[in-house]
Image (spheres, rainbow, N blue to C red):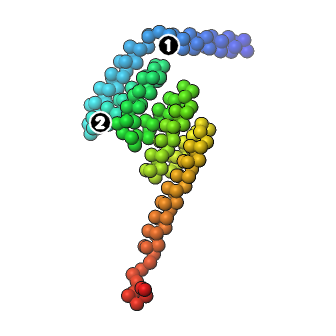
Amino acid sequence: MISRIANWVLWTALTVVVLVLAYKNTDWFKPAADKAMDSVKAVVAKVPGVSSDKSSAAVTIASAREAFARGDVDGAVAIYSEIVKADAKDVDARGELGNVYYMTGRHQQAAEVYFDAANVLIDKKEFDRVDELLPVVAELNPMMADQLVQKLHEGMNAQMMARTSSFESQQQGPQSALTRH
């Protein structure tokens, strides 16, 4: 029984290796991927109520992901960079660009992109999402992480102060002219 399982595992592993090598070293799958991308573009274009800007952005992100999946790292970086240039507040594109840099060993560039994404999130007051980026930035560039922590605390304190003053003003009733200064 054990020899059957070992034999099955060996042949499965060998098959996977052969398929991965065929995928990486040939263009057998490229026509299918291109056809699938064309189908996705056509479907997105036909969706009612979706503006052409949003659908083109979705297709562009999909194109960047496809380029990275094909191993075209420079192409993926170029597409993500264009998306970020077109919309400086697109945190998701920044995050994915950071992921590409991180996975390809460009850690300083990844730290910078994650840092920029976290700053945009702080400006948007999406503090929970900053917490997700902070450990990675700290690993890659501790000085940037310190700056983020400081800005995060300032943003959270400002938001808390605004809530507190709003709450206090709601709790205080109208004052008499005699009790004011």
**Residue that lies at the very extreme toward the front in this rendered image:** 143
Q: Which residue is mark 2?
A: 53
Label placed on residue 23: 1
Q: Residue 174: x, y in percent?
A: 39, 81
Q: CA distance from mark 2 to mark 1?
A: 33 Å
Q: Residues within 10 Å of mark 2 (few under 14, many from 20)?
A: few
As shown in the figure, which amino acid type bears the numbered disc 1? Tyr
Amino acid at circle 2? Asp
- Residue at point 54% right, 47% down? 148
Q: Secondary structure at mark 2?
A: helix
Q: Position of residue 85 (x, y in %)?
A: 37, 36
Tally of numbered tags: 2
Against 16, residue 75 (above or below) is below
Q: Quadrant of the N terminus?
A: top right
User: Which of the pair 39/175 is nearer the observer?
Assistant: 175
Residue at the limit of the structure toward the bottom, as seen here:
178
Q: Residue at x 34, y 33 (%)?
A: 57
Name the spot of residue 21 as percent of width and height, x first. 54, 11
Quadrant in which the C terminus is drawn: bottom left
Examine the rendering and report whether any part of residue 23 can be seen. Answer: yes
The residue drawn where x is 45% and y is 37% is 94
Answer yes or no: is residue 19 visible.
no
